Amino acid sequence: MRRTGAIIFGRRTALASVAVIAGALGAVRAETLTARAGVSGNSVFVGEPFRFQIQVSGSETPEQPDLSGLGGFKVSFSGGGANSRRSVRIINGQRSENVQLGYLLNYELRATREGRLTIPAIAVKAEGKTATTQPLVIVAQKPSETENFKLRLSVSKERAYVGEQILLEAVFYFARGNEIDRSGGIQLSLPVEDNPAFDLHDLDGGQDRGPEQLEGKNFQTSRVRKVLVPTRAGSFPLEPATLSFRSGDGFEIVRDFFGNRVRRPKFKNIAIPSNPLNLVVAPLPREGQPAGFAGHVGEYSVSVQASPSEVNVGDPITLNIALSGPPLLDPVELPPLHEQKSLTADFKVPAEIEDGTVNGNFKVFTQTIRALRDDVKAIPPLELAYFDSAKGRYEVARSQAIPLVVRATRVVTSGDAEGLRPVEAAKLEVQSWMQGIAHNYSGSEALSKQVLGFSGLASAGRLTIVAGPPLAYAILLAVVAGVRRRNAHPETMRARRAMGGFHRGVSHATTSEDVLAVFCRYLGDKLAMTSDALTFRDVEAPLRERGVDDGKLEEIRNLFTAGEASRFAGGIGGEDVAAERDRAAKLVKELEKSLR
């Protein structure tokens, strides 16, 4: 994903607001279409971004004009919006309405060369009509380094491979005693932002680095870092960057809100260039490229945790897969697990996988797998093929195998439970064996049919023996029926006790992983699901069916993410367990309304 825009040292602020176009719009008829142009300043530095605005009157739906061919400028569209005015007058009970339709089109421009540059008249079309803006003249000055202000660019390496992350650092040097107007914004323009041969990603914002020496002089410094990823091979000279800001230039006398004369600092606009750079990018070699290579370049490692480690065939097993590697982990993806044959030979692996979460120096992915057979003894090592740019060859990172206990699962049918399966085998004869232990025959086929008539019930003892079991059964049946009336289903009592069990369990939680485990038990009790190894994907659909809205589902996802990250980190780190307990308790209280 390509990210562009100005890099700001210190506090990030918007560009200077556009100067108000002279003269307010007068009343116009609805069918009149006009257009005017304005800029945030007529004097700029080469490479410095400035705002260009087109104000359209007479329509709220103008077409966006094509400015791609604007000579001497780089153009990017910044969005637009309606700017209509409506007023109502009532005179002698007569109501009249005046409507002035309008629309604003905003652009960011950068001069590419010095001198007097002209923004020509721009044609704007709307509803079959055309209006034209007035031309504007911009004076572009070449940035120049000063004794007190300097800018330096550096890269982690000048020779790289396609797809390799390169650290790009810009350092702003300013002499002590020179006041910088941070409220006005400090804008760094990198020409590489517009270079299609690179993707540019933010790594961190502006940070003060303290005093440093440059060319034998002491400076205060501030830096910003980006990650540069080449998308194609070649030799690329990188033009100097431009840093624009406002520096103190004495004082001026102005009047405050009450009309009093006050003294305030005066600032002037300054722009300084950086040093140029040159990058040489080599293509990835075809020789030795593994079949599962997915474009990972750098040095990677992979580790896996699985829970639970004792399951039945078909039970879910949650894998927490952690990747470490380049400095920027946000764009790094996990290769498809359902394409790893060593894993799919013994496990059912879905094609979908949740987005990973960056946790310090790792990006953690969660996947659920299910054992296919009871002879599976371990989760095999997961593999990640990558190109080691330092060694110049392909490597494969592997996790450790994880021992697993898988128990067989027998499906019990209604025929098994009630003894109603049809007998297909021939009837077995029960035979006596006088030497040793007799043969043991199993199954309903071994039973011998015997008929007991009423003549056999003559004695009271026999009558008790015969009538007693039915009577006891009738009493037991009455008791069971009463219990069933109180608890229509076994899940009902489990669901009723879920909230109490949650509060007892969460009070003893010491890590985010513990909080997630208690929360999963609560959801399992409420949704009649097995709570072991529940994932957000397992509960998302049932919760949505129960009426849980998207906002609550996102909070539940975040709780799962925090717990799984804690599980991978071993329950240590900067986690706020008290906050996690409170967040889980609040979610449970709100879910009770939907899960009754």
Image (cartoon, helix red, strand yellow):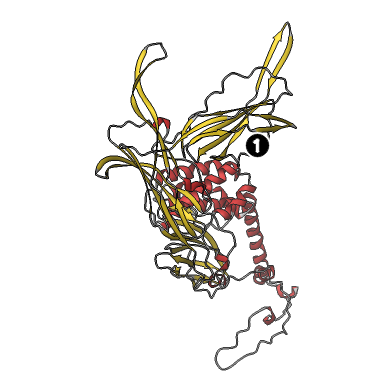
**Position of residue 139 measured from the top left corner of the image (x, y, whole percent):** 49, 32
> Is 11 on the left or on the right of 347, as rendered?
left
> Is 160 on the left or on the right of 534, as rendered?
left
Image quadrant in which you'd find residue 304: bottom left
| Residue at the spot 55% in from the left edge and 45% down from the top edge | 554
> Is 145 on the left or on the right of 292, as rendered?
left
**Position of residue 483 measured from the top left corner of the image (x, y, whole percent):** 61, 53
Residue 90 seen from this side: yes
Q: Nearer the viewer, residue 571 or 68?
A: 68
Q: Nearer the viewer, residue 215 or 362?
A: 215
Question: The residue tagged with tag 1: helix, strand or loop?
Answer: loop
| Residue at the spot 56% in from the left edge and 48% down from the top edge | 496
Question: Dot 1, how many residues are within 10 Å of its Cα: few (below 14), some (14-19), or many (20+)?
Answer: some
Q: Nearer the viewer, residue 388 or 304?
A: 388
Q: From what the image shows, is residue 542 above or below residue 255?
A: below
**Position of residue 590 measured from the top left corner of the image (x, y, whole percent):** 55, 41
Q: From what the image shows, is residue 339 above or below residue 504?
A: below
Name the residue that disc number 1 marks: 64
**Position of residue 202 measured from the top left corner of the image (x, y, whole percent):** 45, 47
Residue 500 seen from this side: no
Q: Amino acid at mark 1?
A: Gln
The residue most toward the front is 115
Q: From what the image shows, is residue 89 above or below residue 501?
A: above
| Residue at the spot 65% in from the left edge and 48% down from the top edge | 545
Quadrant placement of the C terminus: top right
Q: Nearer the viewer, residue 424 or 314?
A: 314
Image quadrant in which you'd find residue 551: top right
